[in-house]
Image (spheres, helix red, strand yellow):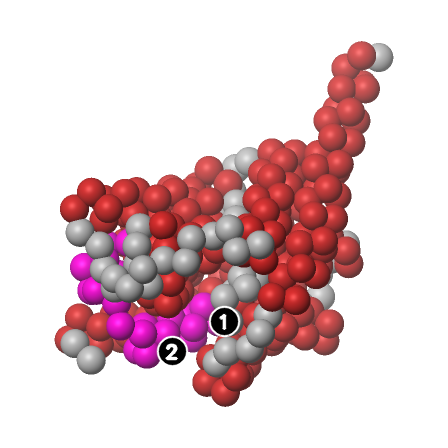
Amino acid sequence: MTTAIYLLLCAFVLVGVWYGWQWFVGIRNQQSSEPRTPRASDTALGFVAQFFDTLGIGSFATTTATFKLWRRVSDEQIPGTLNVGYALPTVAQALIFVAAVTVDPVTLFSMIVAAIVGAWIGVGIVSRLPRRAIQIGMGVALLLAATSFLATNLNLIPGGGEAVGLRGVALAFAIGANFILGALMMLGIGLYAPCLVLVSMLGMNPLAAFPIMMGSCALLMPVGGLRFIRTGRVNVRVALALTLGAIPGVLVAGLIVKSMPIAWLRWLIVFVVLYASGQMLLAARRESREVAAPARS
């Protein structure tokens, strides 16, 4: 293990500890009469979602779809709840995969920094967006996620090459793309699937995407999550449950299971996520009509 990778792993640990403490302080200082004891069902959701997330499925689209099915979290709180609840589990993912998978340090570090900067800018915008804008954004995001799952099942996503790093124009393009993906994370659009497609299209080994995408999220999600907590756009009870369930899910998948055939699960997710996308976009349409009706009268 190189010194640079060792320092990055230390950074993950420090950020995780700092984020956990800041989250505790932020919640303690909030005045709220809402219950905060986690539900068992939300904890189980966190375990299952992050188990498959660690194996490469992604968790944002599936968790959002479940929120819509269960009517658990208000639409405007979904991006914040996802980023807050899954931040610490993603730190655990990053520790496992950055230590285990070889990737060029220049490519790894530059793409991670780009994603963090994108998230910092993106969360400032998302935290002020009206409910309908978030509904439309997440509806489109879910539609794109379903398309990604479908493309994977039909073997339309590039298989990638053998490279473990990028240079020149390819690296500059990857940095710019990861900046955008980091910003979109704050809207609840998962980074994993598009990052995997990105590095594969640029000729990298798809396995090299895992430390890049997990390392990016491990540092950008705490940054964005704390800003969501400060603005109050997060369901604290659900986020806490997701964290408590998700960390064991990551450890079981990353350290014990490691890999399994999941193509069949992607087909199920395509239909579930398409349903959630439709529900989100219909909700935005209804809200638009409700706003327009008093104006006409």
- Residue 246 locus on image (x, y percent): 56, 73
Q: Residue at x 46, y 45 (%)?
A: 184
* Along the line of sight, the residue nearer the viewer: 216 or 74: 216
The stretch of residues the image draws in magenta is 88-111
- Residue 73 locus on image (x, y percent): 69, 54
Q: Among all residues in the image, which is located at the extreme bottom?
A: 256
Number of marks in the image? Answer: 2
Q: Are marks 1 and 2 in contact (CB under 8 Å)?
A: yes
**Is 107 placed above or below 133 here?**
below
**Is 71 placed above or below 16 here?**
above
- One can see residue 267 in this view: yes
Say what amino acid the circle numbered 1 marks: Thr
The residue where tag 1 is placed is 54
Which picture quadrant has residue 121?
Answer: top left
- One can see residue 119 in this view: no
Residue 96 tag number: 2
Say what amino acid the circle numbered 2 marks: Ile
| Predominant SS along the magenta part | helix
In the rendered view, does 117 fall on the left or right side of 222? left
Q: Residue at x 59, y 47 (%)?
A: 147
